[in-house]
Amino acid sequence: MGIPNISTFSGFFLLGFSRQPLLEKMLFVIIVISYLLTLLGNMAIIILARLDPRLHTPMYLFLSHLSLMDLCYTASTVPQLLFNLQSPEKTITYGGCVGQLYVSLAMGSTECILLAVMAIDRYVAVCRPLHYVILMHPRICLQLVAMTWLTGLTSSLVQTVLITQVSLCGRNVIDHVFCEVPVLLKLACVEITFIQTELFLFSAFLLLVPFTLILISYGFIAQAVWKIRSSEGRRKALRTCSSHLLVVLLFYGTAMATYLQPNLATSQDRDKFMALLYGIVTPTLNPFIYTLCNKDMKGALRKVIGKE
């Protein structure tokens, strides 16, 4: 790997998998394919939710914003990652690194809250179907979406500002694939226990409060499904929630494994692969989970393809 003079470069070096050239080549091909699928799948959901009148419901409004978040997140990380995988100089500017950090935190925080909002929507659909039109009125849904974006963008700004205040003393070699909170804090040359505690509590709040709401919602849903006597009624209720539940498990499983783990020495390669899992694989799988598990979305897709 060719690294320019560190003393004259004001950005960062993202080493990634530079010690494993063959793995880099394999990852480049895999990530290109995954990124194209991410773009295709998420853009298809957004377009279908706009074009098909049957999808003009709260569920698909939330789903289209979830797809938009995945597009924003991957756009901030994947092009730079692909460039570094095929380049001998694994560099990213300081502004690019901060921007990547801000967008990833913003989209992660926003997605946490949106998944909770979607769980509440599923609760109302299953447990309060007669009041669904009133409780999930389009105006209320738009307000929920606006609140979700505002909270995520604001919380990310606070966290990003905190991290940029940490003194690095010229250290700019990051043994990772993205600019993320844990790896940037490792470059600190001053005592950061207080900032680490603040960021941990911030992350725990943003992850655990929405997750608790999701658990409560699905607790009530499980009770409602248990009381349904017909097997067809149970299957219909489960179909209503299955895709969202899969996405929740995938998102929260990887997020908690990354941001809520103790501050102990862990395998660097493990952290890198975990970052690729939630940063690339999850946004790729989300649209396919929702389309394969949802007959309305599949019907809208067949309708569009049929017209073409």
Image (tube, grey):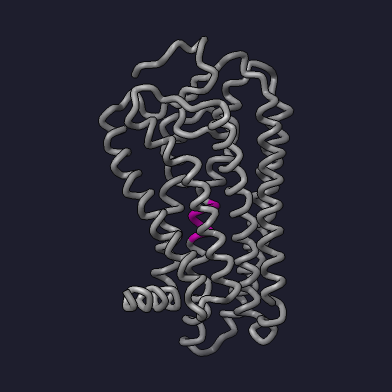
- Magenta segment boundaries in residue numbering: 247-252
Q: Position of residue 68 (x, y in %)?
A: 53, 56
Q: Is residue 50 above or below residue 7?
A: below
Task: Name the side, left or right, on which 72 lies relative to 21.
Answer: right
Q: Quarter-wise, where is residue 224 in the image? A: bottom right
**Nearer to us in this view, 234 or 295:** 295
Task: Give the image quarter of residue 122.
Answer: bottom right
Up the image or down, 256 lies above or below 272; here it is below
Question: At 66% from the left edge and 65% from the top edge, which residue is drawn?
Answer: 216
Q: Quadrant of the N terminus?
A: top left
Q: Residue furthest left?
A: 22
The residue shown at (41%, 32%) is 269
- Residue 279 location, x and y as percent? 47, 45
Return the residue found at the far front: 308
In the figure, 289 relative to 96: above or below? below
What's the residue at 47%, 45% (across, down)?
Answer: 75
In the visual, does 96 lie left or right of 87?
A: right
In the image shown, does 138 or 172 lie closer to the viewer?
138
**What type of secondary structure mainly makes up the magenta span?**
helix
Percent of width and height locating residue 136: 68, 75
Q: Is residue 46 above or below residue 76?
A: below
